[in-house]
Image (spheres, rainbow, N blue to C red):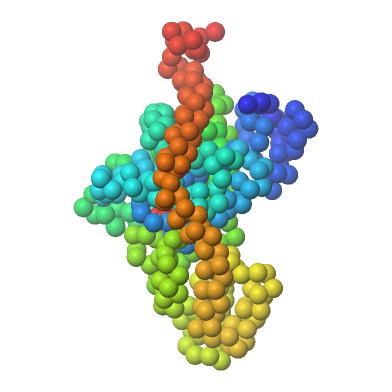
Amino acid sequence: MKSYRVAIRGGQVRALARGVLLRSCLGGPLGLTPGIVMADKPIILSGMQPTGGLHIGNYLGALKQWATLVREDQHDALFCIVDAHAITIPYEPEKMPGLVLDAATSYIAAGIDPDQCTIFLQSDVPEHMELAWYLSAVTALGDLHRMTQFKEKSDQHKENVNAGLFTYPVLQAADILIYKANLVPVGDDQKQHLELAREIARRFNTRFTNVFPEPQAKLSRTPRIMGLDGKSKMSKSKGNTIGLLDAPKTIEKRLKSAFTDEKKLRLGDPGRPEVCNVFTMHTALSPTDQIDTIRADCQSGALGCGDCKKALSTVMLAELEPIRARADELNGNPKRVLEVLKDGGARARKRAQATMADVHTAMGLTTDHRGYSSRS
Ligand code: ADP
């Protein structure tokens, strides 16, 4: 892979080779550090846990955006299935391989073309875990204590508040930094973890030498999908989801029960689309002119919640139909999915090992016997 050097001048990132201005590709400032060598396209890394059946929140918050980014072909993208994260909550080991296969199938079915990016399993690259340990030495305990996801998950799993749950954001930082990723397309709930990953990168670069760019979160248009109960974000563990691969009848039925604007009780009542989760899903799935009409008709009271949900059902089923068809096809050929993981794992590992050589050198954790060291 060709690479070139970038430098920061006057707050702008200038690519010194090929005259490419990365800032314009990314629509915002990059957290690059002078002296960092970048690949010729900005690097994207994201992942999901194989916790059983991705849902519409995962899709509209992250997966749909991943597929678009891969299709646009402006980035060097890696997507992992984070099985080493999933073991921090209670799980059944004998079910994990099937869940990993389901997650990989959903990635590909959702339109993430494995020929255009790298899809891999986190535990195939043990260097993630190695880097997490090194990064833990530059992570402040106080920062980890502030993580809201740890508080939520430890409340949810009181019987199993383990150290892995606490250091989860350090492993997540390692997942990202090991590929020197610039952008991390995630839902709103991951913003705090991303801020910490940036802080960890800064601390490492300051304590040792510049190895890592500071990654930025890239949110989708709908970064937070609420659950059907309207109480908290849509999440598998809350049982308030619509599954990405649910049968059309199930989707229709579950959408009918979706919580909307609590002040809109009957047809004619003016609604508040800005607080309604059904409207949020319309903004991700309906054509633009239809979104404007739905907003206006909800606000005037002309559109009732029942009809609004029916319209959402129609666009959602149309969006998910090809995904379900591709998943069915892949389920009939699991070997194809396993090959994607095998190939992706090998490619990811090679890249991770290259970064680890930089890390070992920066930290003085090697000597000449490896063929690289920090001794001059
Ligand atoms: P879950 O929260 O269901 O356990 P993960 O933690 O594996 O899912 O999240 C995978 C990705 O999906 C992350 O980028 C996360 O931000 C996004 N995501 C999860 N739930 C939602 C949601 N309700 N709305 C928007 N994005 C979400």
Q: Is residue 46 left or right of 182 when viewed as pictured?
A: left
Which residue in the rendered view is the most extreme toward the front? 332
Q: Is residue 146 left or right of residue 199?
A: left
Q: Nearer the viewer, residue 327 or 41?
A: 327
The C terminus, quarter of image: top right
Give the quadrant of the N terminus: top right
Query: Does the rendering let one see residue 254?
Result: yes
Quarter of the rendered image showing ligand 1: bottom left
**From the viewer's perspective, is residue 197 above or below residue 243?**
above
Considering depth in this image, is 209 or 335 the residue closer to the camera?
A: 335
What residue lies at 38% left-to-right and 35% top-to-bottom? 123
Query: Residue 242, percent across and down?
Result: 43, 66
The residue sitting at 49% across, 90% down in the picture is 266
Residue 334 at x, y = what percent?
A: 41, 45
Q: Is residue 230 visible?
A: no
Q: Residue at x 45, y 11 (%)?
A: 370
Expressed as whole percent of the image width and height from the top left, the position of residue 134 reads 41, 28
Residue pictured at 65% horizontal, 81% vertical: 296
Q: Is residue 267 above or below residue 198?
A: below
Give the vertical position of 348 relative to 268 (above or below). above
- Residue 77: x and y in percent read 57, 40
Q: Given the current orientation, which residue lies at the most extreme left position?
A: 159
